[in-house]
Amino acid sequence: MIDRSDGRAPQADAAPGPSPLLYRYWRPPCGVRLAGAETSGWSVLLMPEVGPNATQAHAALEKLLAACRSAGLTASAPRAIDYGEQAVISDGADAMTVNVYGGKGGVRIVLAGKQGTPLAGRVARLIGEQEPALAAAKRPPAALTFPPPPWIGSDESGKGDYFGPLVAAAVYVAAGAEAALRRAGVRDSKLLDDAAARRTAAEVRRLCAGRFAEVVVTPAEYNRRYAALRANRENLNHLLAACHAEALAALLADPRLPVEPPPTVIADQFADERHVRERLQTALAQRGRPLPALIQTPRAEANVAVAAASILARDRFLAWLDEAGRRLSVALPKGGSKPSIITAARQLLARGGEPALAEVAKLHFATTRQVYATTGRGD
């Protein structure tokens, strides 16, 4: 979202639950164009990403702040940060910052500030009183269990990489097909190197022929869709949910897919599960199909269908990155902000300006700031 910068953040509508969003601004170098708009005198509006346990994190921070106030301490109102919330606690002499994160692993509290002070000791003790409940919330189940097959699993690749597309894949696994997929090496793609992932992807496509779908959001399309989401005060989780829903809906609507028994859809829980559920329901309704049973859980890659989807998504991401690198004669490294990524981005920028970079990179990454900071084109 592009908004005129006057040094003040726009007001967010008051709502129950987590506190209003904290707005952060980045002013690009003069003359740099983003989303087709001349940005001289403008700023890009960035909003915090939301973790899957945001509601629990908010509740934990509110409980801690209430305990601090009851103990005679001063506590600020919470403000949103990436994947959590933040508040400042003071005893009049010192101040401590408390960050509470609601990521996949549960709720995590981080205390920052001068250690060894009376305030640090008091706040640490109050946090300690919450630890048993937090530890119980973090404790994973002994083993994930899923309903009997058939399953449709979905996963994505490329969301943390500066270069390359965002890819979502969905795979249908029939009863009796799991053993063959496991023998072919199917497991969470993060446990495989690139070569193994690509070999295994070929086996998944052979074993699940006609029973998978892939959605490739190129960087150019990604940048357009991300800007539209920000304009609607949404974030990356909404784009991820849309991609999962597109892949799942395409597969579920395929007439070649068996109707009986109905499959259970399984996806990794990366945010509020309503994001995927509502988008999938809408996409299927447009195709005249009902919403199937849907399970969203952390560590969903334990299911073979989700693992197979993760491998297909990663293979498609790697193939796109390789092809683009050959076409441009510039190696496009994986990752978010390694020096080699900055170097490659500067080469593309020097060659074709920001439009060339936008064709292969996700411009909202902080990496873009690093790239421009080294070009001598700053304010």
Image: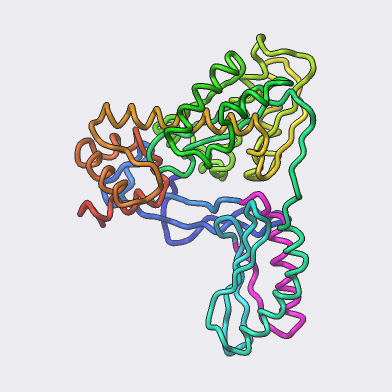
Quadrant into which the C terminus falls: bottom left
Res. 194 image quadrant: top left
Q: Position of residue 172 (x, y in %)?
A: 66, 22
Residue 265 visible to the viewer = yes
Q: Name the colouring of the figure.
A: rainbow
256 up-or-down from 150: above or below: above
Residue drawn at (52%, 52%) of the image: 47
Residue drawn at (58%, 31%) of the image: 186
| Residue closer to the observer: 112 or 209 | 209
Please give left or right for residue 166 compared with residue 103 in the image: left
Please give left or right for residue 322 compared with residue 233 in the image: left
Magenta run includes residue 74: yes
Q: Position of residue 169 (x, y in %)?
A: 56, 28
Q: The magenta stretch spans which residues?
A: 51-79
Q: Position of residue 105 (x, y in %)?
A: 65, 54
Q: Position of residue 52 (x, y in %)?
A: 66, 49
Residue drawn at (60%, 74%) of the image: 88
71 up-or-down from 283: above or below: below
209 up-or-down from 374: above or below: above
The single residue placed furthest to the front in the displayed view is 183
| Residue closer to the observer: 312 or 83 | 312
Magenta run includes residue 337: no
The count of marks equals 0
| Residue closer to the observer: 121 or 275 | 121
Residue 243 visible to the viewer = no
Residue drawn at (37%, 32%) of the image: 321
